Amino acid sequence: MKKRQDNSRSTAFKLLTVVVFVGVLVFFINNLYTGDPDTTLTAFSKQAQKFERHTISSHYQWRVRQPTSMIMLIHFDETGSEIDRKPVRMNHKGWPSAQDSDEGCATVWTSLVGSPLRVDGFNVKARFYSTASNDEAVRRNDSEYWCRYSISKGSEFDYFPGLGKVTQPQL
């Protein structure tokens, strides 16, 4: 009888030791691991840089073909081969734009980035913002309307179509 009690205490002690060890290990892995950067945030940042590069190249293409309300943006892969062509609507100042709505912001993204609103398996939200009270007021002050692109991990950047300005992604 005493041997059985000692055996069950020994088993319980061993089990408790394993549970505590696994708990401590999980704690340290979750709280102290500072390895690789988040690949989703890195991919989103790269797409933001591509967005900015194509905003600028669209503007220069518009300046060459001025006056025009649309340009054709050619997308290339890493080897320099053409992979796609997207029409880009340009505003009167030569910056990529679309209708003043969430859908318009989504259109600007797909035209400039050349891919759907997705990054590393996450949906990109495209939102239109304006501080002006009506459309005419929006057109008078170019900094009072913008598109915000964000992912659920908290990263975002803004694009001001009236100015052609792209902010750096907030990671």
Image (cartoon, grey):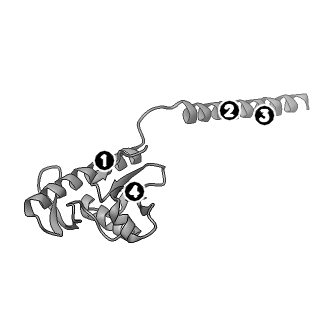
Q: Quadrant of residue 146?
A: bottom left
Q: 18 or 166: which is nearer to us? A: 166
Instruction: Say whether residue 78 is visible.
Output: yes
- In the image, residue 57 lies at what x, y percent? 17, 54
Q: Amino acid at mark 2?
A: Val
28 vs 118: above or below:
above
Q: Which residue is the site of mark 4?
A: 149
Q: Residues within 10 Å of mark 2 (few under 14, many from 20)?
A: few
Q: Are marks 1 and 4 in contact (CB under 8 Å)?
A: no
- Label 4 element class: strand
Q: Are marks 3 and 2 in contact (CB under 8 Å)?
A: no
**Front label number (1 vs 4):** 4
Q: Residues within 10 Å of mark 1 (few under 14, many from 20)?
A: some
Q: Residues within 10 Å of mark 4 (few under 14, many from 20)?
A: many
- Label 3 element class: helix
Q: Which mark is residue 18?
A: 2
Q: Residue at x 36, y 62 (%)?
A: 117
